[in-house]
Image (cartoon, rainbow, N blue to C red):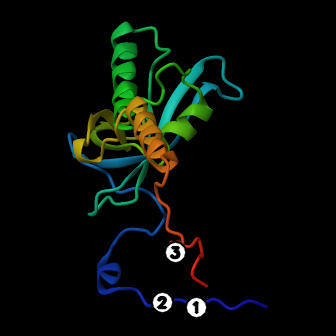
């Protein structure tokens, strides 16, 4: 038998008139905040006849909307060229934020997970639309912007840094911290 311990509701929770149903709080139109990429998908979803691409993010900025999860629907397969171009630009912003690791790689679910997930810190601008039939408020991500102070260096530069560090460590006498040798060749024991 396991036991569960419950904590008391805070005063703020006691005054809340809504439901604790796990739903996101509605974000106002045009709101800007920082997000972190947590995953994504590019390909054919089961049961659908068209390719889709989306990027999962979580709001990382402290505040009212902290930790809310959203999905950016990248319309790279849309018939409208302006929507495709905008989606490609936003995906390029994500790649730039991570130091361009996708350069020379295909946009696949695996590469999104390997190169962007947990690494891409971005600014996101949110939109708000009202459902035609039910009047529900629906948030969506309009686009992404760079967070320059959290940009990773270009992948090529990181390789050069690693080679320079390895060359330093491979140099004769580099990093040696052994016991000094006496003039007679005795190691000093």
Q: Which mark is residue 43?
A: none
Please state which of residues 116 and 33 is positioned toward the viewer in this rendering: 116
The mark lying in front, picked from 3 and 2, is 3
Are the residues tagged 1 and 2 within 8 Å (C-beta)?
yes
Q: Which residue corresponds to mark 1?
A: 5
**Residue 139 location, x and y as percent?**
35, 42
Residue 7 has which mark?
A: 2
Secondary structure of residue under mark 2: loop
| Res 61 seen here | yes
**In the figure, is residue 9 to the left or right of 169?**
left
Label 1 environment density (alpha carbons within 10 Å; few <14, some 14–19, many ≥20)? few
Q: Which mark is residue 182?
A: 3
Is any atom of residue 132 visible in this view?
A: no
Tell me: 47 left or right of 141: right
Q: Quadrant of the C terminus?
A: bottom right
Q: Earlier in the sequence, mark 3 or mark 2?
A: 2
* Residue 68 in the image, given as x and y percentages of width and height: 40, 55
Nearer-the-camera pick, 172 or 41: 172
User: Relative to residue 16, is residue 103 depicted above or below?
Assistant: above
């Amino acid at each position: 038998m396991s036991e569960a311990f419950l904590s008391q509701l805070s005063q703020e929770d006691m005054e809340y008139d809504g439901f604790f149903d796990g739903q996101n709080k509605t974000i106002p139109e045009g709101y800007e905040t920082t997000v972190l990429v947590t995953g994504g998908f590019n390909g054919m979803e089961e049961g659908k006849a068209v390719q889709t691409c989306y990027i999962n993010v979580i709001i990382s900025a402290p505040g009212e909307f902290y930790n809310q999860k959203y999905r950016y629907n990248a319309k790279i397969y849309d018939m409208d060229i302006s929507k495709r171009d905008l989606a490609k630009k936003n995906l390029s912003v994500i790649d730039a934020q991570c130091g361009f690791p996708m350069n020379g790689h295909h946009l696949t679910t695996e590469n999104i997970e390997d190169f962007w997930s947990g690494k891409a810190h971005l600014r996101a601008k949110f939109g708000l639309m009202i459902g035609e039939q039910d009047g529900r408020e629906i948030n969506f991500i309009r686009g992404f912007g760079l967070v320059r102070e959290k940009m990773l260096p270009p992948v090529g530069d990181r390789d050069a840094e690693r080679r320079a560090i390895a060359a330093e460590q491979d140099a004769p006498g580099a990093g040696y911290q052994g016991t000094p040798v006496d003039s007679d060749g005795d190691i000093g024991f």
